[in-house]
Amino acid sequence: MRDQLENIKYIFSEFSFYYLERFCKPHLAESQKHMDTLNYRHLRYFREVAHEGNLTRTAAKLNLSQSALSTQIKTLEERLGHVLFDRVSRELAITEVGRIVLDYADRIFGTGEELVAQLEGRGNVNWPLRVGAISTLSRNFQLQFLKPVLEEQTTEVILKSGGEETLLASLKSLALDVMLTTQPPRNSGTAEFTAHLIAEQTVGAHGNPARLKHKTLEELLRNEPLIVPTESSIRTGFDSLIARLGVQPKIAAEVDDMAMVRLLTREDFGVAIAPNVVLADEIAAGLVETSQFDLAIVETFYAVVARRAFPHPALDDLL
């Protein structure tokens, strides 16, 4: 019985060795070839030699022996599968492939130098400013907020809209530099976020001039179709206003998108209860007017940022 078991073990071990050699080893070798990544020290040495044009001078500059430096360049050529230099007299002439490699090397190490300078406060290169705005926020307000950066034309602006929870998660993960909203998040007083009050806008009644010729605010709210926001601080203020006045309003539309508020008002579907900034273009063009009555409602605008050791430099001009 023991002999049989020993035979079985021997046969199994022989089969395992054959299987590894026949099927697994080629795949492991191929995988190892792809894992053989570029050595950036070799690339740096190549870059120095390419710019200097002489192996001996570069070796002295790098405090290396000429043979050691030559070996490093040879290793890089073998890794890339191309000759990078041709010898012309005592100088080195860069090949066509060498020129391509040098262009990449300059960008790679140049970017690294910019990174170090930026973190040391010496950099003058701005990375993109990533801005998140709640989807209901006025486009006119967003433009006013970003105008100083857009006018300079030195910083790329990436603008993303979405719900508050999604944008806060992006802010927390550093995928955003700032979030624009109309009210501070519930956790803005924590160590994670800071909410900056950046503007307050008067909320008025806006519409076709013919709809605004009422003698009192109560008369206007009672008789004209109204375009009002859904749940928001404006809606809270509006509900409080009509309760104080004892008015039963005629609601034409409840809208959570300020762009739609503009469209409905411009097309004369009713009187909009909205911040003046939302309809600033229509008011300036004479398409819409603002009622003389004070609604005593104010819309606030906040810029929320995460606590960061290296905030985006453009925020200094915006907050």
Image: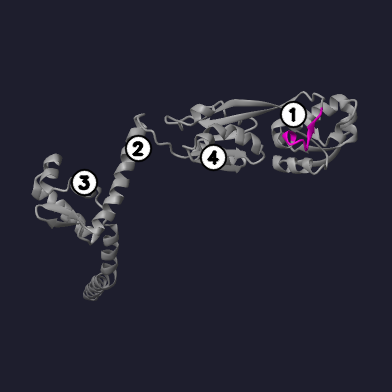
Q: Are marks 2 and 3 in contact (CB under 8 Å)?
A: no
**Residue 15: percent from the left, percent from the top?**
26, 74
First in sequence: mark 3 vs mark 4:
3
Q: Is residue 188 left or right of residue 115?
A: right
Which residue was labeled with disc 3? Answer: 51
Instruction: Say what secondary structure mark 1 lies in.
Output: strand
Crowding around mark 1 (Cα neighbors within 10 Å: few <14, some 14 to 19, many 20+) is: many
Which residue was labeled with disc 2? Answer: 115
**Residue 82: percent from the left, percent from the top?**
22, 61
Which numbered disc covers residue 203? Answer: 1
As shown in the figure, which amino acid type bears the numbered disc 1? Answer: Val
In space, the residues marked 4 and 1 are separated at their CA atoms by 30 Å
Q: Which residues are magenta?
A: 283-291
Which numbered disc covers residue 98? Answer: none
Instruction: State which mark lies toward you, 3 or 4.
Output: 3
Q: Are marks 3 and 4 in contact (CB under 8 Å)?
A: no
In space, the residues marked 3 and 1 are separated at their CA atoms by 64 Å
Crowding around mark 2 (Cα neighbors within 10 Å: few <14, some 14 to 19, many 20+) is: some
Which residue was labeled with disc 4? Answer: 169
